[in-house]
Image (spheres, rainbow, N blue to C red):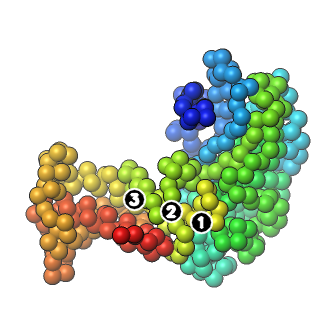
């Protein structure tokens, strides 16, 4: 959990963090999560998140941070994760005693104590059921922006309903991680925002409303448990009196809708129409601002957090830095300098030589293996080292462009 305070000039005046494993060892998480015995189910304890919030605010208080100067507060949470509030919890949230840390007041408020998160991949059957119910994977993507994904919240809710109907029955509200965090500050249930809500397989991205057919396919009475979604820049209301009494926040401090980490990245990078941001990591991620999206089976279309009339696209490529490092090691003696020199020694277009490099099963597209083609479009088993290096780089960027254009991105000259 991280906190950052900025002034009106966007200067950082305070930052800190709580490390789940190190600072909250009593929860016995690894990387902030529990990986269950089936190796598919991955969860995080809800109370760990609440206790981390208590801890970070107490650290700020001890450092002399002046909470009364905070005019507005917002945040970002990991996408797809969900929190299940037990019936009657809203009264406890509204009336939490400022004498107690919040995690003590809320200890009995959650019908599911361990929240399913984005790393979970245990809902394959629910995904198949959802796609079948709405007329296929492409139809689901056309409505919600994505085909069914195991980590997406609607499928996680469907799993909880099918396996633990009593637990679902006891649940009065389902929050995303982002709206859950906003709820803690608001002192009542915060709505889900359009942008983070686009990562659930439940929201009609065009109408900005829940899809009845998707809701019905996942669980009964789901709409009332989700509440009405709102634009991502909505001011939700003033901060809960709990924080004024315990920490000295001004009662006029405004809570602005929280959103998901990916939408927040688009906003934080200050992307505008036509812009692309690329995160080069173990997986490569592409963020795009799109005016007229065309949802496809690969990639995701989300409502834009900055401008609710436009959209953002998200593309993930699994064969990222590890693939590049492997070719660097094979063709450039493990040296990025040698790699760059070899790349510069070949011409753009690689004299017609082309390669696609998937050491692990790729998700965009679903393919595996190394595929090389010469200028005559014949498959070949190997390239000279400098040709291999350029084929890798050009192939990766060509894939990014092709898939971005399929989702509606227009490359301007």
The answer to which of marks 3 and 2 sits earlier in the sequence is 2
Q: Position of residue 104 (x, y in %)?
A: 78, 30
- The residue drawn where x is 57% and y is 65% is 311
Check whether the beta carbons of the residues at disc 1 and disc 3 lie within 8 A of each other.
no
- The residue drawn where x is 67% and y is 54% is 232
Distance from Cα at disc 2 to Cα at disc 1: 9 Å
* Count of numbered marks: 3
Label 1: element kind: loop
The answer to which of marks 2 and 1 sits earlier in the sequence is 2
* Res 216 label: none
Identify residue for label 2: 273
Check whether the beta carbons of the residues at disc 2 and disc 1 lie within 8 A of each other.
yes
Identify residue for label 1: 310
Res 372 quadrant in image: bottom left
Nearer the observer: mark 3 or 2; the answer is 2
Res 286 quadrant in image: bottom left
């Amino acid at each position: 959990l991280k906190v950052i305070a900025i002034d009106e000039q966007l200067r950082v005046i305070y930052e800190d963090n709580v490390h789940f494993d190190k600072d909250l060892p009593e929860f016995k998480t690894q990387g902030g999560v529990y990986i269950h015995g089936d190796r598919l189910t991955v969860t995080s304890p809800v109370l760990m998140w609440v206790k981390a919030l208590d801890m970070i605010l107490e650290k700020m208080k001890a450092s002399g941070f002046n909470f009364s100067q905070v005019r507005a507060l917002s945040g970002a949470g990991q996408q797809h994760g969900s929190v299940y509030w037990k019936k009657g919890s809203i009264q406890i949230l509204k009336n939490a005693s400022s004498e107690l840390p919040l995690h003590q007041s809320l200890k009995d408020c959650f019908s599911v104590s361990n929240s399913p998160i984005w790393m979970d991949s245990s809902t394959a059957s629910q995904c198949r059921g959802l796609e079948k119910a709405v007329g296929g994977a492409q139809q689901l993507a056309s409505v919600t922006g994505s085909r069914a994904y195991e980590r997406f919240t609607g499928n996680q809710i469907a799993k909880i309903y099918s396996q633990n109907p009593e637990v679902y029955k006891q649940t009065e509200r389902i929050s995303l991680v982002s709206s859950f965090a906003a709820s803690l500050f608001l002192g009542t249930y915060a709505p889900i925002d359009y942008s983070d809500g686009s990562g659930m397989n439940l929201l009609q991205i065009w109408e900005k409303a829940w899809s009845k057919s998707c809701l019905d396919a996942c669980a009964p009475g789901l709409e009332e448990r989700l509440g009405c979604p709102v634009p991502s820049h909505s001011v939700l209301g003033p901060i809960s009196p709990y924080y004024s009494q315990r920490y000295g926040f001004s009662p006029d401090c405004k809570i602005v809708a929280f959103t998901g980490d990916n939408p927040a990245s688009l906003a934080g990078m200050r992307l505008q129409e036509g812009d692309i941001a690329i995160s080069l990591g173990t997986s490569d991620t592409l963020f795009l601002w799109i005016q007229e999206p065309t949802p496809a089976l690969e990639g995701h279309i989300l409502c834009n957090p900055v401008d609710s009339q436009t959209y953002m696209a998200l593309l993930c490529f699994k064969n990222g830095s590890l693939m590049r490092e492997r070719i660097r090691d094979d063709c450039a003696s493990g040296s990025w300098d040698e790699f760059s020199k070899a790349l510069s020694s070949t011409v753009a277009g690689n004299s017609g030589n082309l390669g696609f490099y998937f050491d692990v099963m790729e998700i965009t597209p679903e393919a595996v293996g190394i595929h090389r083609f010469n200028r005559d479009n014949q498959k070949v088993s190997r390239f000279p080292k400098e040709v291999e290096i350029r084929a890798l780089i050009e192939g990766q960027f060509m894939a990014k462009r092709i898939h971005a254009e399929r989702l509606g991105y227009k490359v301007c000259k």
